[in-house]
Image (spheres, rainbow, N blue to C red):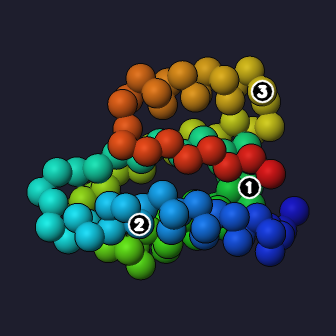
Amino acid sequence: MPVTIRCRELIIALSSAAASPLATQAQHSDRMRRVGVLMSPREDGPEAQARARMLSDGLGELGWIGGRNIHVDYRWAGGEAARAQDYAAGLVSLAPDLIIRSFG
């Protein structure tokens, strides 16, 4: 199933809004930031890959580069509520700077 425009807009808005308070620190901080991302689709699906790419692109536009100043932990629930709940708890235990939940 293709990603809808509405979903794209939501992910771009979330990544921009979530990262913008730290955007000025992106190039000046030596500390690796950690972001947890919980998404509903299956990891191997085209929608999941499109969402991850959009998030990565949005963060990159704000100066956040994976492996350089940010580490993103993705969890893919595959549409299963119980799995999503377990993954959410796991992400919280990692103590990330930010958690993004994308279901839609």
Task: Say which residue appears at 48% left-offset and 31% top-offset.
Answer: 91
Task: Say which residue appears at 76% left-offset and 64% top-offset.
Answer: 7
Q: Position of residue 21 (x, y in %)?
A: 37, 61
* Circles 3 and 2: CB atoms closer than 8 Å: no
Identity, as a three-letter code, of the amino acid under mark 2: Ser
Seen in the image, is 97 located left or right of residue 52? left
Q: Position of residue 52 (x, y in %)?
A: 58, 60
Identity, as a three-letter code, of the amino acid under mark 3: Ala
Circle 2 — which element? helix
Instruction: Please tell me how crowded label 3 is: few (under 14), some (14-19), or many (20+) other residues with Cα within 10 Å.
Output: few
3D distance between C-alphas at marks 3 and 2: 30 Å
Q: Position of residue 50 (x, y in %)?
A: 66, 67
Instruction: Please tell me how crowded label 2 is: few (under 14), some (14-19), or many (20+) other residues with Cα within 10 Å.
Output: some
Pair 3/2: label in front: 2
Q: Nearer the viewer, residue 87 or 1?
A: 87
Task: Say which residue appears at 68% left-offset and 56% top-offset.
Answer: 48
* Circles 2 and 1: CB atoms closer than 8 Å: no
Disc 3: which residue:
81
Task: Say which residue appears at 38% left-offset and 29% top-offset.
Answer: 94
Disc 1: which residue:
45
Q: Nearer the viewer, residue 42 or 85?
A: 85
Identity, as a three-letter code, of the amino acid under mark 1: Gly
Q: Quadrant of residue 82?
A: top right
Vertical position of residue 69 compared to residue 12: above or below? above
3D distance between C-alphas at marks 3 and 1: 18 Å
Disc 2: which residue:
20
Quarter of the image with the N terminus in it:
bottom right
